[in-house]
Amino acid sequence: MEQYIIKGGNPLVGEVEIGGAKNAALAILATAIMSDETVTIENLPDVCDINVMLDAIAGIGGKVDRIDAHTVKINGSMICDLSVDYEYIKKIRASYYLLGALLGKYKRAEVALPGGCDIGSRPIDLHLKGFRALGANVDIRYGLISANAERLRGTHIYLDKVSVGATINIMMAAAMAEGKTTIENAAKEPHVVDVANCLNSMGANIRGAGTDVIRISGVERLHKTEYSIIPDQIEAGTFMFAAAATRGDVTVKNVIPKHLEATTAKLLEIGCEIEELDDAVRVVASKPLHHTQVTTLPYPGFPTDMQPQMSVLLGIAEGTSTVTESIFENRFKYVDELARMGASIKVESNIAIVTGAEKYTGARVSAPDLRAGAALVIAGLAAEGITVVDDIYYIERGYEEFDRKLALLGAQIERVSTEKEILKFKLKVS
Ligand code: UD1
């Protein structure tokens, strides 16, 4: 099993290029099958979750041509199977986007029902409520969701809770429904806008994405496009927090600074300096960090996908901070691992009370999920001594060449898979 081994203590310094947004890409790959013409997608992140999604598309008969690591051509004209297997859903929940895409295009789809996951129970009732409102019959039987409709008809849908997945899934189905659909209390995340922009470039008629009311006029067919995915705000935020935790000076390049506002606001609050450029943000952490309060919220609030990284940073900031998780109920699983590195964090219900320690000390820890795994790597980079992070396949689901990018910033980190390699690394850095 692969691990990261890290010798902490080096401030990260330099520039890092951010890749395409994984969460936007997963949905955009699903939209690509909605046309019978070839859709070219650029700035695709080369991470495991994307490869699973491409396999799922190929699995239903879509033609997938990987032009290079970051470009793919998809042709959905030969889709022969409207049923997406549990094999894919259990690896990435987001393969449920194929439900909205297939239902919109063929008015019929069957997708295995996703189970719970590492960060908590993840219902999809709002997705199904939306499909039903569009006129589909939706059944759950034998572990499968099957949705079918003679015709999908535009309608008015109010989402009881802001949900990125439900907003995107309903938007995809409604893009090819008859008439007008309004989604109220829609998610406003940058990737919702990116999916709407991609669909519009394929001939859809979607207005208002990025606000809480999205208006969609259905079209009969979608055509080819060439579309480039937006930069990944969470990858960018992770590097910004790594810079802050190591008292470094890092410029994250190829980002949309507006998408990072919640992250930059918190870094400013705890004592970092931030310089915003057109498509880059520089983080300088030369002074001691101090405590703050953070609550995760839907965009433009502080992203839940940055919550573990935030706690890691506050764990070595002066004073007592609180981190409130308001989106997912089980997102503090990394706390016990972090405690092994010297953190003082107490979780009460959905609030972590973080008392800043002077420093972390290296230990062997396990990544409990994708973002928490990245957060433990940040702790390792800031820690005194050697940290080994196990179960890094979680991290590799969403970060492309994480170790290489960190090493280019001066981190002492290697991806290893044997005790011998661990020993070699220890000898090299001692
Ligand atoms: C997406 C992101 C994930 C991020 C999350 C919140 C992808 C692939 N994943 O997940 O990284 O952490 O947004 O920004 O883009 N809910 C319901 N019923 C539903 C759907 C959601 O109750 O039908 C609840 C969820 O349990 C959660 C909240 O709504 O409490 C928000 O979830 P949602 O925005 O749907 O998250 P995902 O789209 O699954």
Image: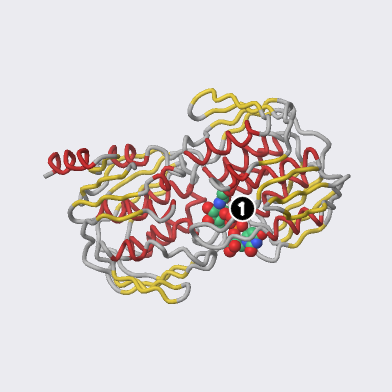
The residue located at (20%, 39%) in the rendering is 420
Most foreground residue, 258 or 213: 213
Image position, residue 134 (x, y; %): 82, 52
Query: Which image quarter: residue 404?
Result: top left
Q: How many marks?
A: 1
In the displayed structure image, the side of residue 317 where residue 182 appears, left or right:
right
Query: In which quadrant will I find the C terminus?
Result: top left
**Which is more toward the observer, 324 or 294?**
324
Residue placed farthest to the front in the image? 142
Quickly name the residue at label 1.
Answer: 114
**Coordinates of residue 238 in the picture (x, y in percent):** 39, 50
Q: Amino acid at mark 1?
A: Pro
Q: From this viewpoint, is residue 368 visible?
A: yes
In the picture provided, is 55 more to the left or to the right than 366? right
Q: Secondary structure at mark 1?
A: loop
Q: Is residue 162 visible?
A: no
Residue 85 x, y percent position in the rendering: 64, 42
Q: Residue at x 58, y 38 (%)?
A: 53
How crowded pointer 1 is (Cα within 10 Å; few <14, some 14-19, many 20+) is rated as: many
Q: Position of residue 297 (x, y in %)?
A: 54, 64
Q: Residue at x 38, y 50 (%)?
A: 275
In the image, residue 16 above or below residue 367: above
